Image: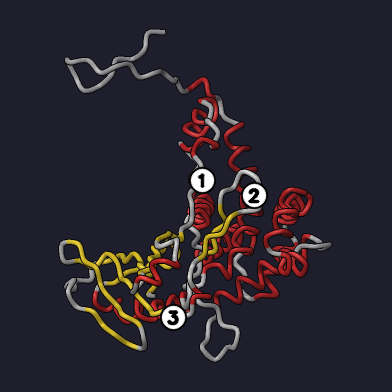
């Protein structure tokens, strides 16, 4: 029995389809489209049936079967491919996707075909259901348009916040931490850069301390952090005062900014999940800060100066729609 893991490849790495590499019980194959590698597959022999995927009748009402999806050696292969993408970056590889993986089980004889009921599945991360997203009102959009006209003092903090939100959505948690940490530093560090000075600046900011307190007071947020990250929740948030959390922000800033191979607990730029807790915590804090600042600006303007209208069907006489008649 062989299991074949197929990973997406991004970049401009040109390599033929018909060359395979065998090394340490594994077979490596680069799959190209128009000459550019778009996938890499790694197959490995799995002789022990205990490591094969299984399907059994479910004891739960309404569920036909339970599936036990096995992924033997995948953790090591993923670490190996992190190294491989680094070596091949010189030749056009930008990224090997280790999150969305196509898994195929290939029986090698009749007995194996008889014993395996699942031959293919995908391991992937799902996007949110767009049906659950709220519709934004015209009032909010109109206020944003007017407020944006001269909100240049908010442009940089909003840019850091926006990039952090996108990075969390794309599960780039380390990059999200950078974005949120720079946003907080830009607003509250007062030009300080030494950790103890930054901590003093953060402690002295009522705006930052209030935003942290609002996060700590949010029962839903705290329940989510406790469920998802019990260890970090206990050491960072549980029974903590806002100044302790702002100290944690400053310490995380120092930890990320200073990197050395001599450090035992060095962070890894590709192991984004290691910063998932920090990214979500910093998002909650930064969201409250920037939402308050943006909402105060949007509420202070006169929206009667902007006019909204509905687009009508295009006419044959021109490319633009006619204004709606009031």
* Dot in front, 3 or 1: 3
Say which mark, if any, is on residue 38: none
Q: Secondary structure at mark 3?
A: loop
Q: Pick the residue in front: 279 or 60.
A: 60
**Where is residue 80, by image quadrant?**
bottom left
The earlier-in-sequence mark between 2 and 1 is: 1
Which quadrant is the N terminus positioned in?
A: bottom left
Marks 2 and 1 sit apart, C-alpha to C-alpha, by: 25 Å
Q: Pick the residue in front: 77 or 313.
A: 77
* Dot in front, 2 or 1: 1
Marks 2 and 3 sit apart, C-alpha to C-alpha, by: 56 Å
- The residue singled out by tag 2 in the image is 289
Crowd band around label 1 with a 10 angstrom C-alpha radius: few (<14), some (14–19), many (20+): few
Q: Is residue 158 above or below residue 8?
A: above
User: Is 210 situated left or right of 18 in this image?
Assistant: right
Q: Pick the residue in front: 245 or 36.
A: 36
Residue 291: image location, x then y, percent: 61, 43
Q: Are marks 2 and 3 in contact (CB under 8 Å)?
A: no
Residue 298: image location, x then y, percent: 57, 34
Residue 106: image location, x then y, percent: 35, 69
- The residue singled out by tag 3 in the image is 47
Q: Residue at x 39, y 63 (%)?
A: 102
User: Is 5 situated left or right of 76 in this image?
Assistant: left
Say which mark, if any, is on residue 128: 1
Q: Secondary structure at mark 1?
A: loop
The earlier-in-sequence mark between 2 and 3 is: 3
Crowd band around label 3 with a 10 angstrom C-alpha radius: few (<14), some (14–19), many (20+): few
Marks 3 and 1 sit apart, C-alpha to C-alpha, by: 38 Å
Q: Are marks 2 and 1 in contact (CB under 8 Å)?
A: no
Q: Residue at x 15, y 62 (%)?
A: 34
Q: Residue at x 41, y 18 (%)?
A: 309
Crowd band around label 2 with a 10 angstrom C-alpha radius: few (<14), some (14–19), many (20+): many
């Amino acid at each position: 029995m062989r299991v074949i893991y197929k990973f997406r490849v991004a970049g401009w790495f040109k390599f033929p389809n018909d060359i395979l590499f065998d090394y340490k019980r594994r077979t490596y194959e680069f799959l190209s489209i128009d000459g550019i590698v778009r996938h890499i597959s790694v197959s490995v022999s799995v002789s022990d049936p205990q490591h094969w995927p299984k399907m059994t009748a479910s004891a739960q009402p309404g569920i036909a079967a339970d599936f036990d999806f096995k992924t033997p050696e995948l953790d090591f292969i993923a670490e190996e491919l992190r190294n491989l993408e680094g070596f091949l970056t010189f030749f056009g590889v930008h990224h090997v996707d280790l999150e969305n993986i196509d898994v195929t089980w290939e029986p090698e004889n009749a007995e194996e075909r008889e014993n395996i009921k699942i031959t293919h599945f995908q391991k992937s991360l799902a996007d949110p259901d767009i049906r659950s997203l709220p519709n934004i009102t015209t009032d909010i959009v109109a206020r944003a348009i007017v407020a944006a006209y001269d909100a240049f003092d908010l442009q940089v903090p909003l840019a850091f916040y926006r990039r952090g939100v996108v990075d969390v959505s794309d599960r780039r948690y380390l990059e999200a931490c950078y974005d949120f940490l720079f946003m907080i530093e830009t607003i509250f560090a007062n030009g300080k850069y030494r950790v103890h000075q930054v901590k003093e600046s953060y402690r002295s900011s009522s705006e930052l301390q209030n935003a942290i307190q609002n996060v700590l007071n949010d029962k839903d947020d705290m329940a989510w952090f406790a469920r998802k990250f019990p260890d970090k929740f206990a050491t960072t948030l549980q029974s903590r005062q806002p100044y302790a959390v702002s100290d944690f922000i400053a310490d995380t800033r120092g930890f990320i900014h200073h990197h050395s191979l001599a450090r035992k607990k060095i962070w890894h730029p590709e192991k984004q999940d290691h910063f998932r807790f920090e990214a979500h915590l910093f998002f909650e804090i930064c969201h409250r800060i920037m939402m308050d600042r943006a909402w105060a600006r949007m509420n202070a303007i006169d929206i009667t100066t902007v006019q909204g209208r509905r687009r009508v069907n295009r006419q044959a006489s021109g490319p633009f729609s006619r204004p709606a008649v009031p």
